[in-house]
Amino acid sequence: MGYNDLIFPQDSLFLVTGGAGFIGSNLCEAILNMGYRVRCLDNLSTGKQENVDPFLEHPNYTFIKGDIVDFDTCLQACEGVDFVLNEAAWGSVPRSIEMPLYYEEINIRGTLNMMEAACRKKVQKFVYASSSSVYGDHPVLPKAEGQEGNLLSPYALTKRVNEEYGKLYKKLYGLDTYGLRYFNVFGRRQDPDGAYAAVIPKFIKQLLADEIPTIHGDGRQSRDFTYIDNVIEANLKACLAPQEAAGEAFNIAYGGREYLIDIYYHICNALGKDVKPNFGPDRLGDIKHSNADISKAKKLLNYNPEYNFERGIELAINWYKKNLQS
């Protein structure tokens, strides 16, 4: 079972921070389609107004333009909320290496503000975005919770700190927190532009424009690419998870392993392109191989992802073909 059949109290109110972003806007859409109320908080620094414009006339949707670094805004946003889905953060390992102070402010202080506000406003569940980057240089595959290595970037550090605060807020204050370690999420509305864009939408856009994409490294790095609907499922099931699972972090992926060069040629074939990529230097702070053990999430969150890579990439390519060429 995915997420469409999940049942919450009829008048449930979900706060989605970072709700105008890639993952956040998909969460907003899914919850609205299920018939529940959504409050979106976003400062539009990385999120896009166009991602949430379709919801503006929806009777169950409200938008707050605000920043999680402002505690009063967090308190206002959490008023009357049942479930917080905290997606507001700055991503990108390379950018965090260039801007560590900013990542400290947004990803650590901002998330702490949200936890404290949720605690004061007696939110039922606080679900927050963590990352597979917390595994650092630990070499063992698949990656399993409790086997973390040395961190490789400020971004990874911010996510590790979020998880430690999540433990403390459960232990000290009784806030039910659930950390979701996303593994390379992709799908509709993911931004293909900019120096720090994720590889799948970037490859698709460049190939559609007959440009030659660049792969950092030799292309033999592997990832557990995870389709967006699996992530939606994980967030919503975490909101229904038992209190015994609170204070924990969970791998959210499909449990597969794809090599970047194979993905590149898969996209080429799907788009009918015959373009050899350029190869650039390895990116500082990147993990070479990433593949998730999702047994903990399956057991404690009832997580059962429906979308493997092949199904997800077909849906993503079709979405970009329609939306980038229209």
Image (tube, rainbow, N blue to C red):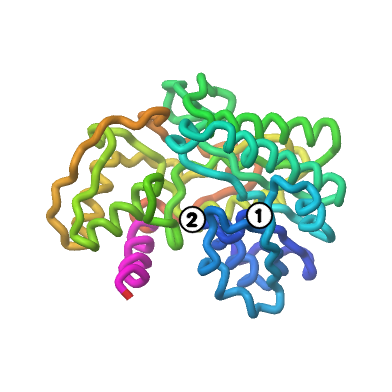
Magenta stretch, overall SS: helix
Q: Secondary structure at mark 2?
A: helix
The structure residue drawn at horizontal position 40% and vertical position 52%, both measured from the top left corner, is: 308
Q: Around disc 2, counting alpha carbons within 10 Å, would you say few (fewer than 14), some (14 to 19), or many (20 or more)?
A: many
Mark sitting on residue 17:
1
Specify whether residue 34 is in view: yes
Relative side of 77 to 173, left or right: left
Please tell me which residue lies in front, 117 or 221: 117
The structure residue drawn at horizontal position 77% and vertical position 57%, both measured from the top left corner, is: 77
Q: Which residue is mark 2?
A: 228
Q: Quadrant of residue 208?
A: bottom left
> Tag 2: residue type?
Ile
Q: Quadrant of residue 55?
A: bottom right
What percent of the width, then of the height, locates residue 27? 59, 60
Please tell me which residue lies in front, 34 or 242: 34
What percent of the width, then of the height, locates residue 292? 47, 36
Q: Quadrant of residue 188?
A: bottom left
